[in-house]
Image (cartoon, helix red, strand yellow):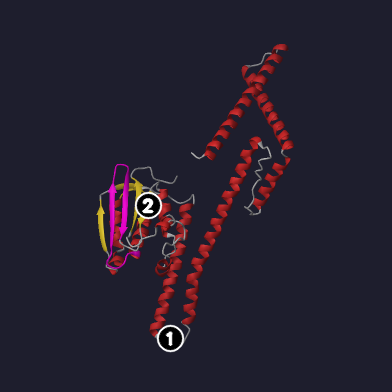
Amino acid sequence: MKPGKLKDIVHRLLGITVAMLCMLGSSAVVYYISYRLLQYYKIELPMLAVQLINMAGGLILLFGTISILVLVTQRHQPHLFEEVREVFRQIGKGNFNVRLNRDPRRKLGHLEVLVDSVNEMTEKLKEMEAMRQEFISNVSHEIQSPLTSIRGFAQALGGESLTEEERRHYLRIIEMESTRLSRLSDNLLKLSSLESDFHRFQPSDFRLDKQLRNLVLACEPQWLEKGIEMELELTPATIRADEEMLSQVWVNLIHNSIKFTPSGGTITISLQLSPAEASVRIADTGIGIKVEEQERIFERFYKADKSRNRESGGSGLGLSIVKKIVDTHKGTVKVQSSPGAGTQFIVTLPVGETSGPG
């Protein structure tokens, strides 16, 4: 456990302990006073009424004590509370480059936790804003690139000197770029749906080996066209998961393997089953991925081979979708690769009813 988290837990426990002691102390004081008063004036009340009086009096005394402490604290630290208000005003305006001054010469006492919490919150908000800006920039770039191509070739089609072959070539490019735009839109919608709280997760029992075999047959034209040898080593396995969501995982991984495996290469898909989990390995003899890039390939819009992705119409969202779906199933996805030596993705999924949104 990190020292910062341990310190935060200790502070919280101390706060709860102090609050409970204050509550007990207040109740004891009120009980003593009410007991003496009732005894002095010889008043007899039902036990329930006495308990209610003690409880109400204890709460009043406790909140009164807290109010006095807050007033005293504000009197000693007036600038801190003004700084907190200013920080929140800046955050409301969208400025996350603000922090509370942690001057060691200023004795804050128990308010150090407040200062640390506010500073941590602004840091997290700043990171989220940077991610949002990067996401918008990436989406704009991915949309602008095919639109520019479509506009340019559409204008070129207006030329009267074009041959029929050139015209068909330009039309194929426009069709390819339109498909790329459509795929980008579809993937963005998938990611948005997966990350929302309203995505329907529908687990059922099904044969994972049959699903993999059917998907390999469905993309047979693609791997036959490149002369790729497809090897299957599938152990019969029944798991409980969302069949439709998992099909997107296998389609993305298989298509990636076909895309980056040269003609005459080999793709091996294996499935191993244990009492607790099923492990799917999709290995190819393709171009591979650099070690420094393997940690980032599941990020949105990240492309390990930008030129190859651009030529094949990739948007850099496929592996993000894979990671999100596997996480939803409480599974893991790993990559093992090196340039020129091929790539293998290993997806591990729980077999039973442990899968589902967290």
Do labels 1 and 2 touch, CB within 8 Å?
A: no
Q: Nearer the viewer, mark 1 or mark 2?
A: 2
Residue 265 on the magenta segment: yes
Residue at point 47%, 71% (across, down): 146
**Horizontal and vertical percent position of residue 212:** 30, 55
Q: Which mark is residue 334?
A: 2
Q: Which residue is mark 1?
A: 162
Q: Quadrant of the C terminus?
A: top left
Residue 74 on the magenta segment: no
The answer to whether residue 157 is above or below residue 13 is below
Q: What residue type is disc 2 on?
A: Lys
Q: Main secondary structure of the magenta part?
A: strand
Q: Quadrant of residue 74?
A: top right
**Horizontal and vertical percent position of residue 150:** 47, 75
Q: Is residue 233 left or right of residue 130?
A: left
The answer to whether residue 24 is above or below residue 141 is above
Residue range highlighted in magenta: 260-284
At label 1, counting other C-alpha atoms closer than 10 Å, the crowd grade (few under 14, some 14-19, many 20 or more) is: few
Cα–Cα span, label 1 and label 2: 50 Å
Depth check: give the residue in front, 151 or 2.
2
Q: What residue type is disc 1 on?
A: Leu
The answer to whether residue 187 is above or below residue 176 is above
